[in-house]
Image: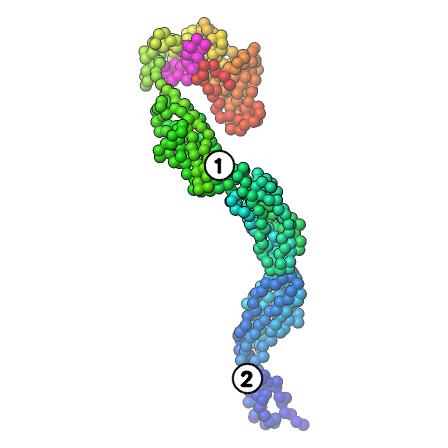
Amino acid sequence: MDRRAPRPHLRAGCLANSRLPYLSSPLLLPLLLLLAAACHAACPLPTITTQPQSQAVCSGGSVSFSISAFSAGCTVSYQWYGPQGLISGATGTNYTISPVNIGNAGNYYAVASVIGSSRQSSNATLTVLGPGAVQFSAAGYSVLKTTSVASIMVARTGGSCGAGSVNYTTANGTATAGIDYSATSGTLVFSDGVTMLSLLVPVLNNPAHTGDKYFTVSLSGASWVSLGSPPLATVTILDPVPAITTQPQDLTAAVGYPATFTVMATGTAPLSYQWQKGSAAIGGASNASYTVASVQAQDAGAYSVVVSNSYGSVASSNAVLTVTLPYTFSTIAGLAGVSGTNDGAGGAARFNNPSGVAVDNAGNLYVTDNGNQTIRKLAQVGTNWVVSTLAGLAGSLGTNDGTGSAARFDLPDGIAVDNTGSLYVADGQNFTIRKITSGGFVSTLAGLALNAGTNDGIGSTARFTFPMGVGLNNGSNIYVADGFNFTIRKIAPGAIVSTLAGLAGNIGSADGLGSAARFNYPKIGRASCRERV
C-alpha cells in the first residue's frame, strides 16, 4: 500500500512550483514537513499605496471610492466599511454608490488583508449636497443717493445642486417708491452650481428729498431651494449732502460760566463746520460743538453753524444765548464751623445741624434746628436776618405739646408752611407729625410719640417710623416722606392718614402705582417757598 504523505497546499512563490518527488523514506519526511511549514509563514503587513479620498456630491449623483495595497509575494483582499458598518459584497479595490442619497453621508474606509495580517485605510468622508438655501448675504446695505442703482447680493448656501429660484420684491420704508427709488420685483434663478446672484434696484437722485432714507427687499416663493435667513434686507439711501439731524439749542448762562452749542448732522464724510454769531464767522469754531468758555454780557445773541462737504452745505437754525448775572451765595445767619444755641442777628446766631427750611408768604424763614431740638425763625430787619427760637428748648428733647419753649421735639427734620402761616414738622425720632401755629403753639397732628409703626388711621392711631420730610399741595393735604417705612403718606383734613405710595418695610427703586412703587429712605425736598409734592 502506498503511504506517501499528501502534498501540502503551498502559497505562491514557495515549494508549490518545485518538482519534488513523492518520498517514501521515513528519514526524509521530517525535512519535507519543515519546508511545508516555512511555506505557510505569514505575509508581510500590507502597505496602502492609494488611500480613499473624501468627496462631496449632489444627491442623486454617483460616487466611487478607491484603494490599492501591496504585500510582497502575497495576494491582498479588501473589505469596505461605511457609516452602518461592514458593506456586504464590497470586496474590490473600488466601491461605488449610485444614486447617492442623504442617508449615504458619512465616513468610509477599507481593510486590506493578507494571510496573518491586515491594515485599515484612512477615513474618506462622503458629503451629500442638497439644493441649498437662499438668503441675503447681509441684513443691511447702503448706497449713495447719487448712485444710479443698488446692487443687493443673494447667496445660496448649504449646497448648490440643481437649479432653483426665489422671488423678490421691494417695499417702502422712509424711502418712497417713484421718488427715492424704483419699485422692483422679479425672480432670481440659480443654475446648478451657482452660489451668488445680485438683484438691482434703481435709485433716484431726487433733490427735493434730503436726508438718509431706506426701503426693504424681501425674498419669498423659493422653488427647489429653501428660504434661509435673513429673508429681508434693509437698503439705506445715503444723502451725500449734509443734513442737520439735531439743531443747536437756546442756552442761558451766567457771566463767567461756560456755554456749549452742539449740532448733529449726517452726510458723506468728511463734514466741516463753521460756527457764526449773527452773520459773522467765529474764528477757529470748526467742530460739531462750540463753547464760550467764560460767558460775558457781550456774548449774548444768536448763534448758528454751517455744515459742509464736497456735495454741498446746510445752515442750522439760530440758537440764542441769554446771559444772566451769576448767583451770589452769602451767609445770612450763623457762623461757619461754630455750633450753638444763641438767638441773634446774622453771624451772632448759632445753630446745631439745621436740617429743614421753609419760607412763608411774608418772606420769613423757618428752620428745623435738628441738633438743638428746636424750631427757629429768621425775620429780615433791614439788611440783617434776626434769629429767634419759635418752639422747643435747646438741648431738651421730648414729646410735650405746648407753646414756645414748653414744647419738645426729638430730631425734627422736614418742615413746611401753609398759607395761614402754620408750620408742619416731621418730628423724626418721636415718630410724629407736629403742627405749629403762627403764635407758636405746638400740637401733635398725627402719630403717637415714641410709637413707631406703619398703621394708617386718624390722628394718634396712625403710626410713622422716622418721618423725614413733609410737604403741602395747593389744597389742604399734607404729604409725609416716611423715611424708615419707605413710603409716602398723605394726611387729609381731619388728620386722616393713608399710605399714598410704596409698601411699608419694602425698600427699592421700582416705579409703579401705589403699593407697587418702592422707595429708599424717601425725603421730600424742603428748600422751597411752599413745600409741595
Q: Is residue 375 one of those drawn in magenta?
A: yes
Q: What sort of colour scheme is used for the picture? A: rainbow
Q: Indicate whether 215 appears above or below 224.
A: above
Q: Is residue 307 left or right of residue 61?
A: left
Which residue appears at 41% of the width and 28% of the height? 303
Q: CA distance from mark 1 to mark 2?
A: 97 Å
Task: Give the residue type that dot 1 points to.
Answer: Ala
Asked whether 504 or 365 is in front, the reply is 365
Q: Which residue is mark 1?
A: 243
Residue 321: quarter of image: top left
Which image quadrant: the N terminus? bottom right
Query: Depth check: 388 or 193 in front?
Result: 193
Q: Nearer the viewer, residue 238 or 209?
A: 209
Q: Position of residue 130 (x, y in %)?
A: 63, 58
Q: Amino acid at mark 2?
A: Ala
Looking at the image, can residue 385 be seen? yes
Residue 173 place in picture, x, y as percent: 59, 40
Query: What residue span does the magenta drawing correspond to?
Result: 350-377
| Callout 2 secondary element | helix
Q: Which residue is mark 2?
A: 38
Question: Nearer the observer, disc 1 or disc 2?
Answer: 1
Mark count: 2
Give me the residue at 47% from left, 12% from top.
Answer: 417
